[in-house]
Every structure is written in C-alpha cells, then in structure tokens.
Amino acid sequence: MNKDEFRVALQRGIYKVINPFVRFLIKAGLTPNMVTTIGLVLNIGVAVIFIIGVEEGNRGDLTYVGWAGFLVLFAGIFDMLDGQVARLGNMSSTFGAFYDSVLDRYSEMVMFLGICYYLVGHHYFFSSLFAFIALIGSVMVSYTRARAEGLRVECKEGLMQRPERVVLVGISAISCGVASNYIGGDYKLFIPGIPFHVFETMSIFTIPITVMAVLTNITAVNRLLSVKKILDKKDSDEISINR
C-alpha cells in the first residue's frame, strides 16, 4: 500500500467514525459553510489561548500550550466535517469549496499568529523565527496546489499537507503541556562541555515546528519543480503540434 492508498484508507476509516455526528449536524440544520466558519472561530480561540498564555501566564507555565493544542485538534475535526456535511447532505457547491479553501488559510494564519505571539512574548525568539517560516511554508504548500490546479495540473505530492500540519501542531502542543506537569515547564538538559542547554520542555513543541518549517518549504519547492516539468512538456507538445 503506497502513501496515497494509505491516506484514502485512513480517511474512509475516519469518516465511518464521524458520519453519525455529521448526520446529526445535518439534521440540526447546519450547512457546510457554517461548519467551516465554526472551524475558523475555533482557530481564533487557539490564538486567544496563546495570547492569554503570554499576558496572564509565565514562561514556565506551559498549560496554555497544552490547551491550545487540544483546541487545534478539535478545530481540525471541523476541517473534515464541512466536506462530509456537503457530501452526505447533498449541499456541495463550487462557492462552498472556495469558501472552505479561503477560511482554511485564515484559520492556519490565525493559529500561527498565536504561536508566534506566544514564542516572542516568552522570549523564544529563535523558535518564533522557525514558526514564521513554517507559516510561510504552510501557505505556499496550499498555494502551489491551488495555482497548479488552476492551470489544470494535479499537484498533491509532498509531505506536510494541512491534515499533517494540524495533527503535528496539536499533538506536539498537547505533549508539551502534559510533559510540563511531570518534568516542569522550566526543565533544561545540559551536556557537560556544552555551555548552553540542548533541550528544554518547550522543545517538545518547538522542535516539531522547526521540522514543519523545513518540510513544508521543501514540499512547496518540489511542487514548483514538478509543475514546471509538466507545463514545460505541455508547452513543448503544443509547439510541436503547431509546427
């Protein structure tokens, strides 16, 4: 089973679990666009938690990170629900797909706004830089696919698509919050001979963000190169035909 087949099989398994809730939402009168909007509101809530974590918390209190991670995953569920509500409720529309895509971008940017605010506010300046780079990569992964499909070129390959990004941010944030209750929010690991710490509790959250910063941008560049090959071949074929 290749990666795409695994993704499809996983999605089908998830849909079997969430379909009863989807039918409940349909009976309650919610439209796909309403579900999409709820997802955005929840992601605004994620940013608010991170901001409160700066204004009300302290550097060693990582419980805000954990709660934000939980809300990231909960909001991510609505990313899946809106499409399924549209399918099962026969409410699919071209504008609905466009609306979903636009609000997904807003949701992600708002989430990263909260993350960057938290990291800067608690003086994790280097990590905040990688969080911003991860935001750039995340937007470009989505943009390269959208722009390619606008040119009628399929562009789905690569790591760190939106579901993976949501899961990585959510799980790493929750793990960071939980770990702080056991090892402390200010825990630092030093190695003899090295004048600075090589690991701290916050690293449980920031290391995955750094990995995301690298992989998202690699994916965006790979998509750019892949689309270039396809479009160059199309242009070459058209020139050959016109001769």
Image: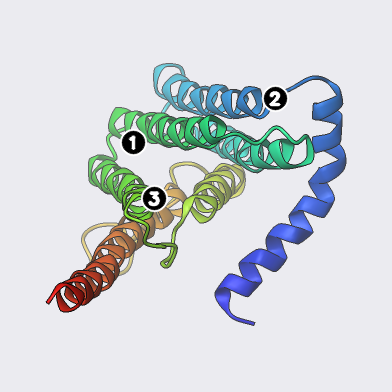
* Colour theme: rainbow
Cα–Cα span, label 1 and label 3: 9 Å
Q: Earlier in the sequence, mark 3 or mark 2?
A: 2
Nearest to viewer (mark 3 / mark 2): 2
Instruction: Pinpoint residue 133: horizontal percent, then vertical percent.
Output: 26, 48
Q: How far apart are marks 1 and 2 (CA)?
A: 36 Å
| SS of the residue under disc 3 | helix
Left or right of 100 in this view: 234 = left
The residue where tag 3 is placed is 206
In contact (CB < 8 Å): disc 1 and disc 3: yes
Q: Which residue lies furthest to the left in this view?
A: 243
Q: Mark 1 points at which residue?
A: 119
Q: Which mark is residue 31?
A: 2
Quick one: which residue is furthest to the bottom in this view? 1
Earlier in the chain: of badge 1 and badge 3, it is: 1
Indicate the quadrant containing the C terminus: top left, top right, bottom left or bottom right.
Answer: bottom left
Q: Is mark 2 on a helix, strand or loop?
A: loop
Lateral position of residue 163 relative to residue 28, left or right: left
Residue type (three-letter) at the residue carrying disc 3:
Thr
Q: Report the front residue among 140 and 201.
A: 140
Whether residue 189 is visible here, answered yes or no, is no
- Residue 62 image offset from top left, x and y in percent: 50, 36
The residue under the point 65% across, 36% down is: 92
In the image, what residue type sits under mark 2?
Thr
Q: Which amino acid does label 1 sit on?
A: Leu
Identified at 61% across, 25% down, the residue is 33
Nearest to the observer: residue 168 or residue 221: 221
Quarter of the image where the N terminus is located: bottom right
Give how far across and how far down residue 127 sits, in percent: 29, 46
In percent of the image, x 25 and y 71: which residue is there?
Answer: 234
Cα gap from disc 3 to disc 2, whole angstroms:
36 Å
